[in-house]
Amino acid sequence: MTDALPTIRLKNAWKSSHPWIFQKLVDKPAVRPKPGSIVDVVGNDGVWLGRGFYNGHSRIALRILENDPAVTVDAAWFAARIGEAVRLRREVLGLDAVSDAWRVVHSEGDGLSGLVVDRYGDLLVVEFFSAGMFRHREWIYEALRQQFPGARFHSFADEHVQKQESFDFKPWNSLGSEPAAPAVITEYGVKFRADPAGAHKTGFFADQRENRQWLSQQVAGKRVLDLCCNTGGFGVYAAVRGAAEVVGVDIDQDVLEIARGNARLNDVRVRFVQADIFPWLRDAGNNGEGFDVVILDPAKMTRDREQVIPALKKYLDMNKLALGVVKPGGLFATFSCTGLVSEEQFLDMLRRAAFYAGRTVQVLKVAGAGADHPFLAHVPESRYLKAVFCRVLD
């Protein structure tokens, strides 16, 4: 079968082990395979380099999946690779003992470039980031069914991805006509409703699981502020773990409704406020409000390399304001899920925010996404979440 695959040739010598090869490095084939086709890749000297997806419409022309010429990329290959990803989560990380919500496949981190799968109880959310993964989705669904018998599916691809990768995918659920019903999941004993077909695209942020758990151990009897609270993850954890008072602030009324539902699921009280955090924090600071624990977890700022500096400026402004309402000796947890902002840049932003806020920040812990979001050392693009836990000394 492999003999029949189209062959794509590179223009220059290729020494990298990174799975992405960009369009400018690839010779235009005489007959262009359809976006997402599986191809053999050879160097400019004709020597075989790998096997993967080709997309003549995308900036990333090739996504290498396999480096062994004897191995065919087919349904069995997907079953084996997805099986290995599930074994990592279940047998090595032991996640089933902690939660029934975890990332099943983390794209390049699991050798499956362009595919993300999240598990929420009996519901599997499949997100396509490449035409190749979309094109071979039936193999993916079959492999997932082997690992999660009886699972429900919700599949989607962001519009900007469909445009970049040149594929068209509109239905809520590729395996049926109705949107998937929400799932109720449990994480370290705390319950949440995951609703991927509702207001929030993936249903729930499992990547913050260990960060929520760690921070929730520090909140008993404390006054807690959860900024950009989204569906209430940190705030609900804090209330369950015995915080004296929890306030959650977000600009999106839809996610706040989910957050209120999550508080009810756990029989706890959280005061959720719909507001833009900038004026809200200015008012709180002017009124002398102080919190023992402040969490700041904004949405992704940009996916455009040209907009990294404006994104850092926005991070600076919001972190400076948030630091202004932390009581002396209080805890401040600040996050960035903007992959283009490096950990070094984020820590430098925090240093400047503390300077402008006139606060001394003692960093206790720097973390990221949970271990179910692995990244390969030679593919740092899969690493996106930065988490910094601090004490504000004065």
Image (cartoon, rainbow, N blue to C red):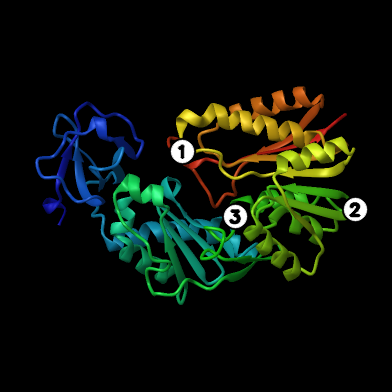
Query: What residue sits right under mark 1 in the picture?
Result: 381
Query: What residue sits right under mark 3 in the picture?
Result: 205
- Disc 1 is placed on an element classified as helix
- Disc 3 and disc 1 in contact, CB within 8 angstroms: no
Can residue 111 be seen at all in this image of the molecule? no
Q: Please tell me how crowded label 1 is: few (under 14), some (14-19), or many (20+) other residues with Cα within 10 Å.
A: some
At a point 56% along the width and 29% down the height, the residue shown is 310
Q: Earlier in the sequence, mark 3 or mark 2?
A: 3
Extreme residue in the bottom direction: 150
Q: Position of residue 32 (x, y in %)?
A: 15, 45
Q: Is residue 225 left or right of residue 212?
A: right
Q: Distance of mark 3 from mark 2, alpha carbons?
A: 26 Å
Against 118, is 320 above or below? Answer: above
Q: Amino acid at mark 1?
A: Glu
Q: Position of residue 317 (x, y in %)?
A: 69, 31
Q: Distance of mark 1 from mark 2, alpha carbons?
A: 39 Å
Report the disc number at residue 221. 2
- Disc 3 is placed on an element classified as loop
Q: Amino acid at mark 2?
A: Gly
Q: Earlier in the sequence, mark 3 or mark 1?
A: 3
